[in-house]
Amino acid sequence: MASDPAFGSNDEFRSAAEEAARIGGAILQDWVGRFSVREKSRANLVTEADEASQAAIVNFLKDRFPSHRFLAEENLNQSSAEDEPRWIIDPLDGTSNYVHGFPYYAVSIALYRSNCLQVGVIFDPTRDEMFAAAAGQGATLNGNPLVTSGIEEVSEAMAMASLPIAAPPDDPAIRRFLLGLSSLQTVQRSGSAALNLAYVAAGRLDVFWSSSLHPWDVAAGALLVQEAGGAITDLTGDAIDIFRPSLLAASTEKLNQEVRSVLS
């Protein structure tokens, strides 16, 4: 079993994910100022940088782990059996920010197997910050241990919310955003779910919620929050399912419960 790359250790997988994320991040930075932009759908942007970053990440991981499968944002969805390792990749989370020169974007890579997140890595190439986690081994930022802020009171919490693209005024997500504004200390929208989750894990944010994300947006960050001691559920309080677009991450279980009450 040990000779089959599919059954390597989480340490090995995390190290490979970090290396792949740095490769992808370097490509993003190399494309700054010379990419073109197109819309996949209304206000849903993609650039050559997204595609080049994804190709390099996938090629690197395929070469390292030839039996693994992949799910990635830019048109890559390989089915896998439950016990087969599957890499979940967002080569550029925060494309709109990237396009506008707003330095809040990242590469996100996770490894999923047997219905569990095994490894999660989020790399911010603008700050050279590598957030990493492996199941049962804690979370780190550039090798230093991470722990959530420990905030428990809604009135003291800084939150981020993710809103659907071009959401109409009567969208439930808009209602939740307004409900949050009236109770939390502050609520903002950043454009990068991956970094929002990494920041909850790092104690820079206390809450993040969304009802409109994809697995590649949240997989790595969900593990980071869990391993940093945070509480992550769906918006009803059920166990998080990265394949369903409902997520609430908070610094503590108490805060998670209180924010759910506010948003309901």
Image (cartoon, rainbow, N blue to C red):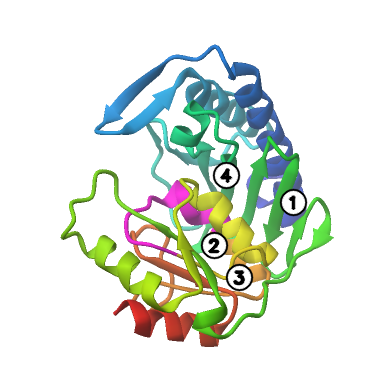
> Is 100 situated left or right of 228 in this image?
left
Q: Which residue is mark 2?
A: 222
Q: For numbered disc 4, what is the local secondary structure?
A: strand
> Is 128 situated left or right of 233 in this image?
right
Sooner in the amino-acid sequence: mark 3 or mark 1: 1
Residue ID at (65%, 18%) = 30
Q: CA distance from mark 1 to mark 4?
A: 27 Å
Q: Are marks 2 and 3 in contact (CB under 8 Å)?
A: yes
Q: Residue furthest top?
A: 34
Q: Which mark is residue 2?
A: 1
Q: Is residue 112 visible?
A: no
Residue 215: image location, x then y, percent? 42, 51
Q: Which residue is mark 4?
A: 108
Query: Magenta segment, which residues?
Result: 209-221
Q: Are marks 4 and 3 in contact (CB under 8 Å)?
A: no
Q: Nearer the viewer, mark 2 or mark 1?
A: 2
